[in-house]
Image: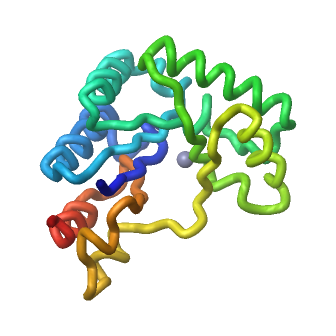
Amino acid sequence: MIYVRDDDVLLPSRQWPDPLARFKEVHEMLADFDFVIHIPTLLTSELDRYPEAIDYIRRETNDGWMIPEFHGTSHIDYADLTPEEILQDYKKGQDWFKAHLGVEFTRHYTPWGAGEDERGAHIKPTAVAAGVVVVTCAALLEPEHIIADPYATYEKYESREIFIHWWAGIGKLERALTKIKP
Ligand SMILES: [Zn+2]
């Protein structure tokens, strides 16, 4: 399997007046590749505005085509929070995941990659206490890297995670996945 990490679902974007339609377009494109799992990283307070999106994510998760993970209760800098505040925020996030999606998240994909530097040094150990793995923006694999790689194959990228934003163009992602299609 290859994973596609899709950040900021469904943070409003001037570019996409109908964020749900755009998100579905990304997911349906990915569904053409049966070796790909979509990992939308969710902002729970943003999703409250789109009940239809919540239903969609729950269905696709049940069917095994999505692994929703946590980006934040909102798009905040987690380095600004104390460990206690982070744990409260995770609790709020997990309650939301259980109530709306019927699953818990296991990873926190932090906004702006918080947790990688000195300022956010407390985030990873705090998350461990909550059973959550922090994923930052270190060593991101983007569609461009695969397109530019003359030796790209499925085997080479197996288990890796490709990074996109749901609102960005999907042409390059589609090209990258077509290139490594086994
Ligand atoms: Zn973000």
Compared to residue 164, the image places residue 95 above or below, namely above
Quadrant of the image containing the C terminus? bottom left
**Where in the figure is residue 46, as x and y percent of width and height?**
50, 27
Residue placed farthest to the bottom in the image?
150
The image quarter containing residue 89 is top right
State which quarter of the image contains the N terminus: bottom left
Number of marks: 0
Residue 107: x %, y % from top left: 57, 41
Residue placed at 84% from the left, 56% from the top?
Answer: 119
Q: Residue furthest front?
A: 155
Q: Nearer the viewer, residue 67 or 45?
A: 67
Left or right of 47, for residue 116: right
The residue sitting at 79% across, 45% down in the picture is 125
Q: Give the left or right position of residue 50, taking residue 80 as reference.
A: left
Which residue shows up at 60% across the image and 41% down it? Answer: 108
* Residue in front for this viewpoint, 58 or 44: 58
Q: Residue at 37% x, 76% y: name it.
A: 145
Q: How is the image coloured?
A: rainbow
Locate residue 148, reporting x and y percent: 31, 83
Decide: is 74 above or below 161: above
Q: Position of residue 104 (x, y in %)?
A: 52, 25
Which picture quadrant has residue 121? bottom right
Q: 160 left or right of 132?
A: left
75 or 78, which lies in front? Answer: 78
